[in-house]
Image (cartoon, rainbow, N blue to C red):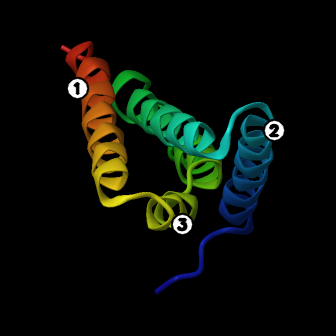
Amino acid sequence: MESPPLRHLLLVGVGGAVGALSRYGVDLIFEISLATLIVNLFGVAIAAVCIYRLSLTHEQQLFLVTGFAGGFTTYSAFALLLYDLTLPQAGLYIAASLLLSLAIIRVIRAGVR
């Protein structure tokens, strides 16, 4: 396997740093469970818009989807949050996260026709 160009690594790294710092900003504004839901849903929307609505170059996708959205969203916070919830609360949070994520993708993708 060929190594990616340094430019690609920098695009992903800088995008990830911007995403992580943005994530931290959301954490400062909202309570943790709401912050996690917001960043994960917003990250899905960003990725879906980039993939289905915009004609981005490969490098733009590396920065926005792999870097920014990857650094902005988090599965680890999602899992840790679920661990501390009661079973009914966890089920509701999982369902809301997944169903709202799929709805966001559906709405964004529907505009691609």
Tell me which label, 1 or 3, sits earlier in the chain.
3
**Secondary structure of the residue carrying numbered label 3:** helix
The residue that mark 1 highlights is 106
What residue is shown with label 2?
28
Q: Amino acid at mark 2?
A: Leu
Residue at 49 percent of width and 57 percent of height: 78
Residue 96: where, in percent of width, then height?
32, 38
Residue bearing the label numbered 3 = 80
From the top left corner, tell me how far across and down residue 48 is, in percent: 38, 33
Residue 110: % across, % down: 21, 17
Residues at marks 3 and 2 touching, judged by CB atoms closer than 8 Å: no
Q: How busy is the neighbourhood of tag 2: few (under 14 within 10 Å), some, or many (20 plus)?
A: few
Q: Residue at x 37, y 45 (%)?
A: 93
Instruction: Give the SS element for disc 1.
Output: helix
* Disc 2 secondary structure class: helix
Mark nearer the N terminus (3 vs 2):
2
**10 vs 48: above or below:** below
Q: Is residue 106 above or below residue 31?
A: above
Left or right of residue 43, residue 31 in this image: right
Closer to us: 23 or 95: 95
Q: CA distance from mark 1 to mark 2?
A: 30 Å
